[in-house]
Amino acid sequence: MKLIFRMQKNNRYSLIPLISAVHSRVKDVQIFLANDVREILKIEPPAVVAYSFMSFDLDQISKEIQKLKVLGYTLIAGGPHVTARPFKSLELGFHHIFIGDGEENLIRFLNGEQDVIFDGLKNRINLDDYPPFCVDLDLFMPLEITRGCVFDCAYCETSLIGGRKPRHRSIESIIHYCELGLKKNKYIARFISPNSFGYGSIDGIKPNVNAIDTMLFELKKIGMREIYFGTFPSDVRPESVSDDLLKAIKKYVNNRSITIGAQSGSERVLKKIKRTHSVENLLKAIDLILSNDFTPYVDFIFGFPFETDEDRYETLNLIDKLVRIGCKIHAHTFMPLPGTELEQIGSAVIPEWFRKRIAQLSSQGKLDGYWEKQRILSQKLAGR
């Protein structure tokens, strides 16, 4: 069987674990990576073309499917948009779709099962059962240490896709795959997690200092030269920040910043988006981060349609305060993502005066992010 993975800028972290699962478990499958439709067309059917995509890639994917579905390819898809819109995805022309966890179900499909919808929302995988990246094919990515998020923020798809019960990769598995990476001269460790400071925790919130300390110690022991933990591509929740944990990780990590989610300076907005923490919780976490000689990179989301000018001023006042004490600000614009509680609320609303203030902070080097691009994407999503 020929299996073509359609690689895109936004889906690499989704596809590499699937490629790794197939390579490790399924015999007699030829794996191809295609960066555009032209590369797919070089491989004659019969062949399976696998997509994983987000909602703002839908237009491009739809055009590609129209070209491919009449040529004899078997088209399959998973990812955030498909999980949120399974039946609409079938209407695009896909023959089989995969929602939630994809590893086990993709293997079932390749072994001959012919369900139209493969449901990975009910039977969640154990991360230790599958490799996080594919050493043989030299396909590496930050190592996923936790899947699933106990929080259910109203704007976020993470708990929909990964479930609300956090599942942690064991320390033994993490060390095993990092040792394999070292043989390929991969000396830098980065991680993927909805809340990296929740690693090893039963509830995904209270930090398990011993588990994190042990993991980082073992990574240094096997020869990892650089370790980045609590920063991109995984941030931390204010509720999970503790002085003991920060002191523990400081012994091992190379990052001098910690990425933490604030999202708003308005208590009213925080409650409406179901963040579960307060501004006071955030400020306490920020104080601990600063006192341990890390720079906080603080995420904010602007443009919730129910925001008032009072909410916006509260957010700006908090940003000004954080900048004064040494924080960096990372800005996002609200996007009504399918499958979330706020998907029907409309596109982001950002008054011109607020945009000018954010642009001013950006020009001063106090704030960064792709909020302008996301503002356009927000309008695009709301128009579907």
Image: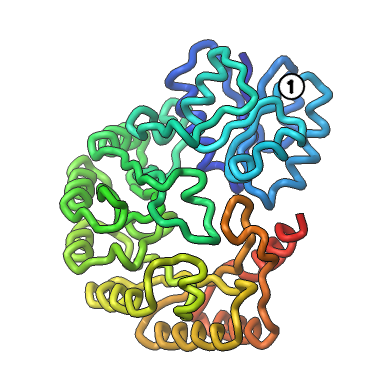
Relative to 5, 225 lies left or right: left
The residue tagged 1 is: 73
At label 1, the amino acid type is Tyr
Residue shown at 35%/28% (left/top)? Answer: 129
* Quarter of the rendering occupied by the N terminus: top right
Q: Quadrant of residue 41?
A: top right
Give the crowd class for mark 1: few <14, some 14-19, many >=20 residues within 10 Å: many
Q: Determine if residue 49 is in view.
A: no
Q: Quadrant of residue 328?
A: bottom left
Q: Position of residue 281 (x, y in %)?
A: 32, 75
Instruction: From the viewer's side, name the closer residue of 79 and 325.
Output: 79
Image colouring: rainbow
Residue shown at 52%/19% (left/top)? Answer: 108
Residue shown at 68%/52% (left/top)? Answer: 56
Q: Position of residue 63 (x, y in %)?
A: 80, 40
Residue shown at 61%/38% (left/top)? Answer: 52
Q: Is residue 312 above or below residue 166?
A: below
Q: Position of residue 380 (x, y in %)?
A: 74, 59
Q: Quadrant of residue 284?
A: bottom left
Instruction: From the viewer's side, name the closer residue of 2 and 203.
Output: 203
Q: Position of residue 70 (x, y in %)?
A: 83, 24
